[in-house]
Image: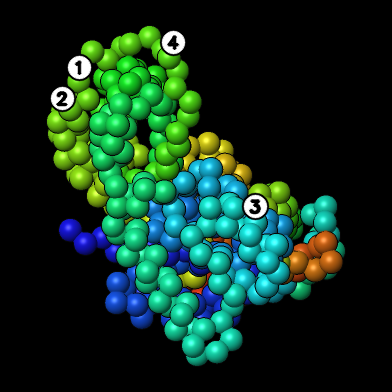
Amino acid sequence: MHIQNKILILDDEQQFMELCKELLSTLPAKPDVRTASSGAHAIALLEAEPYSLLLTDLRMPNIDGFQVLAIVRRRFPSLRTMVMTGVTEDEYRTRAYAMGIDMYLEKPKTSQDIKMFVDCVESLLAREEAGGFRGVQSKTLTDIVQMESLSQSSVTLKFTNGPFVGKIWLLNGDLMDAEMGELQGEDAFKKIMSWRAGTFEHLPADTKRERRIMNSVQGLLLDSAQMLDEMAAGEVPGSGGEKAKATSPLAELGRSPGVEFVLTTEMGKGKKFEHFACEAPDKTAAWAARAAERFNHLGEKIKAGTLQQIVTTGTQRGTGLAPKGEKVLCAGFQSGRTAGQILETLKKMAAQWAS
Amino acid sequence: MGLLDFFSSKKNAPAIDRLPSGSFTVDRHGNVLTSTLPRSFDEANVREIGKTVMEAMVCAREANLPVTEMSIHFSGLKITAKEQGGGVMIFLAPVR
């Protein structure tokens, strides 16, 4: 099944982002292109749903591109990253490549530059579709383990897939042990083998490692085939399968025009909440819950009728609150949206949420 | 006619509160400074609106959502608050 690629553009220049968005939307792969004007918002979006490619500027206020790349490399190791910046010094280019980016481009100035930029993005998306572990392109995890086993290596393989880290110990090509979180031995091995993409590194062999796996590598690899099927169905945590890529109802609401984040909570203290791409969900939920409750009471007291919506605009962003019974829908909007635009979008979102 | 008089006679019926139209300003502590609201609208209600709006704006700032303008839509009234040098100017407009 074809999965739509998602691209996240991070830049503090709104016009440049819009231009990139327009250019990339014309790619044959028809990627879903989202934008973020701050590093914090970009990280929140990446946490909310999986992306195929992050396209980032380097010079930005508060959190710069390097800081974002450092966080991304640690938390989303399999994410393709591309720097597009006005910074031309080789020092920065080298530093960015050292952080594991896939491509470094200067901001396009001519039509040829634009064509090259679009071609590069298309090429990166094609690599993303091919999957594979970074460093051994087009090789599956099974291939890696099989290669090490056949060459009778003594090595510790460390695999990272998002927040998950797994280790496999081999001694003279024999599988000694595996570990992933609380899992050990064969269970850990099968779990690691279910991962679709990520990063891996060779660590020195641990000859004193106690042997917990008695079955052969080949036998276990066959067993793991079943896990690979589950992975395709997205049933394995961190596998990046179909279910993992499926969008939540809040993410659907987040696609409304100008929306930066969506959060739902209950009137009162807002301790329970769900959110999509909200930078500080706990504080936002507390504010939304409290404001909705206070204005609800105010409406009753001054006999103004039912509270329908609250809209705010500000220098950083706008927000919209819409209560439904005891629940509250809160959405963040890009700065520059008028109160009228926010209200119109909020009404549609509230109707969709209620249904 | 006597029957019609019976239906039209509302001398003893309670008066229906009219939702106010006008504006007022509050300082950063929520004290009402000036008002163009009708005197028929209870002063306690005016203070309550000012206090609730100020609190919502302060809490929004604390939640990293600084607000310069806020509109609260009730089924019968729209309240619009605009930040002005620490205080707030608040407009009330009944929904027609």
Q: Are marks 3 and 1 in contact (CB under 8 Å)?
A: no
Amino acid at pointer 1: Asn
Nearer the N terminus, badge 2 or badge 4?
4
Q: Tell me residue A216's x, y (percent).
A: 20, 20
Question: Toward the viewer: A347 or A202?
Answer: A202
What residue is rendered at 53% in x and 52% in y? A100
Instruction: Say which chain tag 2 marks.
Output: A
Nearer the N terminus, badge 3 or badge 2?
3
Q: Return the residue at label 1.
A: A215
Sort mark 1 into few (<14), some (14-19) or many (20+) by Cα contacts within 10 Å. few
Amino acid at pointer 3: Gln
CA gap, disc 3 and disc 4: 39 Å
Sort mark 4 into few (<14), some (14-19) or many (20+) by Cα contacts within 10 Å. few
Q: For the residue labelled by badge 1, is the local secondary structure a helix, a strand or a loop? A: loop
Nearer the N terminus, badge 1 or badge 4?
4
CA gap, disc 1 and disc 4: 19 Å
